[in-house]
Amino acid sequence: MRTIFNIVLCTMISLSAVGQDYSPMKVESCSSLKGGKTPKWTMNDTRIVDSLHGFKAVEVTAQNEYGSDCTKRYEATGFFYAVKDGNRWWMVDPYGYRNLNIAVVGVRPGKSDRNKSQFKSKFGDEKRWIANTVDTLQSLGFYGSGSWSEDSLVREFDKENETQFTYTPMLNFMARYGEKRGGTYQRPGNIGYPNQTIFVFDPQFEIFCDEQAQQLVQYRDDKNLVGYFSDNEMPLTLENLEGYLSLPNPDDPGRKAAEAWLEEQHITRDQITDAHRAAFVGLVAERYYSIVSKAIKRYDPNHMFLGSRLHGKPKYIKEVIEAAGRYCDVVSINYYGSWTPDQELMRNWGEWAQKPFVITEFYTKGMDSGLANTSGAGFAVRTQQDRGYAYQHFTLGLLESGNCVGWHWFRYQDNDPTAKGVDPSNVDSNKGLVDNNYEVYQPLARLMKQLNMNVYELARYFDAHK
C-alpha cells in the first residue's frame, strides 16, 4: 500500500443556505500530503445532485454547442458577454443564449517521455488528439478549455469542423514584462516578484502591454473566444506597501511610488495600519487593471477581459476586488482551501466588484490513482468516486451563488512524476480528468457529467429555494 505523508489539516466545513433541502453524505478528505508524520483525515458533509430534495436529474437536451440554455435568449452580439437577470448573473453566448462557462484547464498533451509515447500510440497526431479530446469533454458537459491549453489547435479544429469549443487565452502581461525586465522567478504555482511586488509603476510596463496586445487583432472576430486572462495569481496583498518601501534600489519606480503615497497620507512607516495597506494595494490593483484592460480593449473590443485569476489573500481584500470590477467584464478567481464555497464571500465578490465571477481553478486528488499527491493545493480524497462527489458538492455551492458564471476544473491530465523541469506545484498529483496514459477516470467523469448536464435546472432549483 502507498505510504501517505503528513497532513496539514485546514478543511473548512459549512452548510449552505439551503442546507435543509438536502440529505448530506460524508466524504473523507485531507488538505496536504507533505512531510513524514501520520496523516489525519476529516469527514465532510457533502451535497450531491442525488441528495437534493425535490430535484430529479436528467440530461437536458436544450443545450446548444456552447452548452447554453436555449430556453432563454438575450441580445445576440456574435460574442460572449455577461448580463444580470434578476438576482443571477449569466454569460451570454454569441447567439444570445444564456451560458455558464464550464471548462477544463490545461487541455494539452503531457510533455514527459511517457506522455509522448502514449500520445503517439493512442492518437498518432495532434489532429486526432484534439478531435478525440473535444468529443470527450463535450460529452461530459465541458464546452471549453481554460488557461494553458492548446489554443491554436482548438481554433484550427473549430474552423475545420465548424464547431464551437471555446477557449480563454492567457496573456501573461506582467509575467512576460518581468521576464524581460529581470527579477522574477518560479514559485510553486505562480511567478514570484522582488518582495512580492509587481512592476506596475514602471513607465515601460504600459508600453509593453500595448505592444503585446497588438497581437490580439487576430482574435477579434473569433466568436469561440470567451475572453482573456491578463496574468495568473499575482501577489496583490496587504504586504505590498512595506514590500515596495523595502525594495533595495532607491530609484525603483515602485519604491518611489510607495514613498510618495506615504507622504500624501501624511504618515510615516511606523504609523502604517491595515487600512493604509488595503488602500495602497487597491491603488496597485487599480493601476494594473486599468493598464492591461486599456491595452486589451484597444486591439480587441469584442471579447471580455476575465481578470488575473486572483488567488489566496487577494480574494479577501475588498479594495482589490473593487478595482478588478471596475475594469474586468468577469472577475476570475482560483479557489482553494475550502471544502464548501463560502456563500458570504461570494456575495461580497458580487457586491464589491458589481460584476460576476468565474472560478478558474479547483480540484481534488484521489489516493487510488497511484500518485503520491504531495504537490499542489487541492484536497486529497480516497477514491475517484469521492473526487466526483467533491466536484458536485463544490459546484453546487457555486451554482447556489447567483454571482457565479462558470468554473474551470484544474486540469486535463495528471502530473507525471517522471517529467523534468515542471512547476513545483505540478509534480506528482492526481489532478487530471485523464491519467498519464490518456485514460479518463470514469467514476469522476460520470459524476461530473451528471452535474454539468443539469446546471441550468439546478440554477432554477436554487433560485426557487431562496
Image (spheres, grey):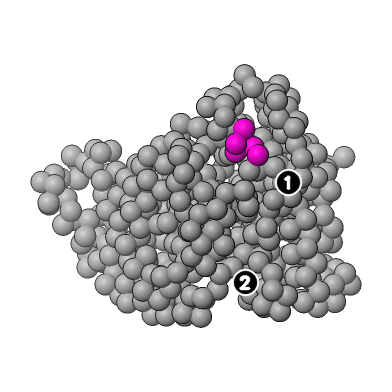
Q: Which mark is residue 60?
A: 1
Residue in the picture at 32% in, 77% down: 207
Nearer the N terminus, badge 2 or badge 1?
A: 1
Q: What residue is disc 2 on? A: 151
Instruction: Give residue 281's position: percent from left, percent from top.
Output: 31, 50
Residue 353: x %, y % from top left: 37, 46
Q: Is residue 278 above or below residue 182?
A: above
Question: Alpha-carbon neighbours of circle 2 within 10 Å: few (<14), some, or many (≥20)?
Answer: many
In the displayed structure image, the side of residue 441 where residue 464 appears, left or right: left
Look at the numbered discs 2 and 1 and tell me whether their residues touch, using CB distance below 8 Å: no
Residue 235 higher or lower than 395, as above or below: below
Per the image, label 2 sits on a secondary structure element best described as helix
State whether the magenta stretch is mostly helix, strand or loop.
Answer: helix
- In screen coordinates, is 321 left or right of 77? left
What residue type is disc 2 on?
Asp
Residue 70 on the magenta span: no
Question: Position of 418 compared to 353: left or right?
Answer: right
Label 2, label 1: how far apart the Cα atoms are: 28 Å
Q: Secondary structure at mark 1?
A: loop
Q: Which residues are magenta?
A: 457-461
Q: Quadrant of residue 347?
A: top left
